[in-house]
Amino acid sequence: MCGIAGLWSPNAPKNADQALAEKMADTLYHRGPDGRGFHVDADKGLAMAHTRLSIIGLDAGTQPIYGREDDGTQDLILTANGEFYDYKRLRGLLRTDGYAFNTKTDSEIALKLYDKHGLDFMPHLRGEFAFTLYDAKQDRLILVRDRFGIRPLFYHLGDEGFFWGSELKAMLAHPAVPREMCPKAQLHQMMQVQVPGMTLFKGIHALKPGHMLIVTRKGDGFEVEEREYWDAVFPLDGEHDELTDEEHIENVRAKLVESITFRLEADVPVACYLSGGIDSCSIIGMAAAIQQSPVKAFTISFDDTRYDEAAIATEMAEKAGADQDILNVKALDLYGQNFEDAIRFSERTFYNTLGVAKMLMSKHVREVGYKVVITGEGSDELFGGYAQFKADYFLHDPAYAETAAGDDMKKRNAIFSGSVLAEQAISHPAFEEVMGFTPSWIQPWMLVLERVKPLLSEDFKAKLGDYDPIAAIAYSLDRSKLDGRHVLDKVQYSWIKTMLEGQILNWGGDRVDMANSLESRPAFLDHHVAEMAMRIPPHVRIRDGIEKWVVREAMKHVLPEVLYKREKFAFMAPPAHTDEAKTAEINKLIEKWLSSEKLAEVGIFDEAKLTASIEDYRKSDDHTQNTRKDIILNHAIGLHAIGDLL
């Protein structure tokens, strides 16, 4: 894991200055505290920066990595962030083709594979990564992001040239990159869900997961091509793999063993995150069996029993013989400076302080000597684990449509009403057009939007015009990959394209882990696991109302009975209104960031209307409505703080 940044400014070569490149790299120190390297070519206006977190090839992994012609010219230059798995086998194959390696790291295979296959090299790469590769012969720069967007990568094309970075702050450190915020993006962050590729800043884009960007110099400018090399494509309804239950179960088990085995490989110790869910518990159980020794397991415990899963995690740790380390997170830990730090590292707002808790956990993990953890993200997305997915399955699949299964499920998950579960049904014509229904996962955020709209200032509404953020999200989805699909496949695909990359893998993953130089490896998001999972029939993923049925059966031998039988419980920190200490802490943030002066400066809200809403929140004892207002306050604080924090 590392940080990368750079610029290509042939018409303004002064931008490719060593001092400016170092300034960009300084902002990424947390992503790579173990070393840094630069390639600066003033004649071409090219600067490439790399900050290194040493995981593999500890003493021989300096970047940039070069590919050289026989005459010694540097024709290929690579800076990479992340991990490429199965690299030893690939190095062996490439050696038989005559390729020599200059480092012991996994990253160098990307350079050699590109040299061999050209732009068709991506099917050979496996892992979580973001990298840039400059090809001097073609005079082009290639940016690549992994299939699910586990690792971040951003870019800006402007009059001063082309800029990129692992984080927005790396580009914003260069004086040639504008830092004007986009009103549409601000609105999207207030309602939690962004359009794929969107960032908070005008002209700065996130490279989409499963895409490469090919930037070729043409005269005085650039030709830019965005090319998709992979997507989470589900089969047409009725064309899933019709195997026996036992075959599906064994396939899941075998693919996960392979994925976890790859992710246990490093030249430093590897630990695991352990919550009370079957995903992280399955990883702990299998990791212990694979390495035939105790696994170090890190668990978060909250000071609210309604949200705390530590007891179940402990039962799993005992069953697996893991060495468990529990971090107790209290109310005061989730706000104040920690809240602000989570915004600064995530570079976006968040609806719940679970990201703050995970940032505190990553800090603790590093303090006790670990650089790498395996995590359980992705299982819910691929195997139908979320309550919102089940709600649509129960509502729209004929096998459940006449039952009360959906209502029963919502009653059991009442604590999440107002956050991830909508307290009332709501629809939008754009989603009805694109998907045939409005998915349950977006309905809570539509309700947030409805409560936000009356609070906006007239000036801000004028900037938005008739912009419809829900329609923008719906129309960003590729209908060719939705048409003819089963309802469960539709909701999983739409979530993967939006919330997985924008939320789960951002302020719930890479950004808060790498805030403390910790590499997280989500084993379920190996694309070999994903391609197998997407071909499993919906009724095998969810069987008789039991989410992730096939995963439960595959992991039955390693899970405690209580966990094997337990319904999915969303990992979430207790909202601010749930006790007086948290309320007091969020009030301090409100006073600091939602003052009259700050509201006037940022211009999003009508002060009188927002103040009245906050006062109503303070007087109310309605859990659902207060949970929703907690969300609005978290986002509002974040939007008013982020400009000062970046």
Image (cartoon, helix red, strand yellow):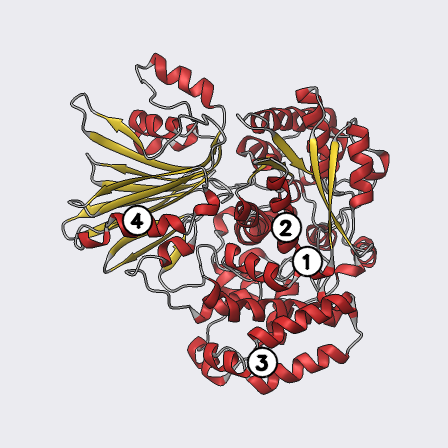
Q: Can residue 210 be seen at all in this image of the molecule?
A: yes
Residue 21's tag is: 4
Disc 3 target residue: 455
Quadrant occupied by the C terminus: bottom left
Q: Residues within 10 Å of mark 2 (few under 14, many from 20)?
A: many
Disc 1 target residue: 333
Judged from the image, the secondary structure of the residue bearing numbered disc 3 is helix
Q: Position of residue 539 (x, y in %)?
A: 72, 39
Q: Can residue 483 be seen at all in this image of the molecule?
A: no
Q: Residues within 10 Å of mark 3 (few under 14, many from 20)?
A: some
Q: Residues within 10 Å of mark 1 (few under 14, many from 20)?
A: some
Q: Is residue 130 above or below residue 442?
A: above
Q: Is residue 218 above or below residue 552?
A: below
User: Nearer the viewer's eye, disc 1 or disc 3?
Assistant: 1
Q: CA gap, disc 1 to disc 3? A: 29 Å
Residue type at the position of mark 1: Asp
Q: Residues within 10 Å of mark 4 (few under 14, many from 20)?
A: many
Label whose residue precedes the other's in the sequence (2 or 3)? 2
Q: Nearer the viewer, residue 171 or 605?
A: 171
Disc 2 target residue: 360
Tell me whether the residue at label 2 lies in contact with that at label 4, contact meaning CB atoms closer than 8 angstroms: no
